[in-house]
Amino acid sequence: MTVLTDEMKDVLHKNNKKFIAVPMATASKEGVPNVAPMASVWVRDDATLWICDNFMKKTLHNLQENPIAAFYFWDADTKRCFQVKGHAGIHTSGPEYEEMYGMVKKERPSFPAKSLIVVTITAVYDCTPGANAGAQLQ
Ligand SMILES: Cc1cc2nc3c(=O)[nH]c(=O)nc-3n(C[C@H](O)[C@H](O)[C@H](O)COP(=O)(O)O)c2cc1C
């Protein structure tokens, strides 16, 4: 199982607090890339990210035909940066979807929260500029 370390989770939690968007990359079946900003990105557990699909179009279409995604999280204070890759599942019902829907509606009642993207992390790389850039960490 590929897991996030405390340092990696801290970067994402800091972004969450400041409502800083995380770039989410996907690709079509033919390999056409797409990247979009996502702020509703949470660490669900050490090996799983949750993303709320409010307005996804190409992102969602890509995940339907090619269920993989990549992200990076950057901390402006420490300059630490992590690149995360994973398999993405789309949930539009069930207890996990209902939990996410409740969380989003509480904070942002006008947001549709139309699906929950569950990303099972498969790899984490260092993307902090320097000697270790590009190295696989997890
Ligand atoms: C700062 C910021 C945060 C965003 N957060 C989310 C989000 O958490 N979920 C979402 O579905 N859309 C979010 N969006 C909107 C999407 O990025 C936007 O709908 C984009 O067009 C999606 O890309 P796509 O159409 O290629 O799928 C956010 C946009 C910005 C600027």
Image (tube, helix red, strand yellow):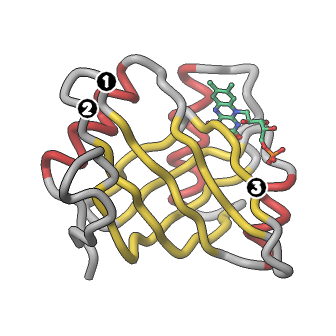
Q: Is mark 3 on a helix, strand or loop?
A: strand
Give, as a three-letter code, the residue at label 2: Lys
Q: Is residue 1 left or right of residue 25?
A: left
Residue identified by numbered label 3: 34
Horizontal side of 27 relative to 116 (left or right) equals right
For badge 1, the amino acid type reads Ala
Q: Position of residue 21 (x, y in %)?
A: 54, 31
| Residue shown at 56% from the left, 37% from the top | 102
Q: Is residue 130 left or right of residue 49?
A: left
Asked if the residues shown at circle 2 and circle 3 are in contact, with their CB atoms under 8 angstroms apart, the answer is no
Residue 79's disc number: 2
Contact between marks 2 and 1 (CB within 8 A): the answer is: yes
| Distance between mark 2 and mark 3 Cα atoms | 25 Å
Q: Does the numbered disc 1 mark a residue whose Cβ is under 8 Å from ligand 1? A: no
Q: What residue type is labelled 3?
A: Asn
**Image quadrant, ligand 1:** top right
Mark 3 Cβ and ligand 1 under 8 Å apart: yes
Q: Name the residue under label 1.
A: 76
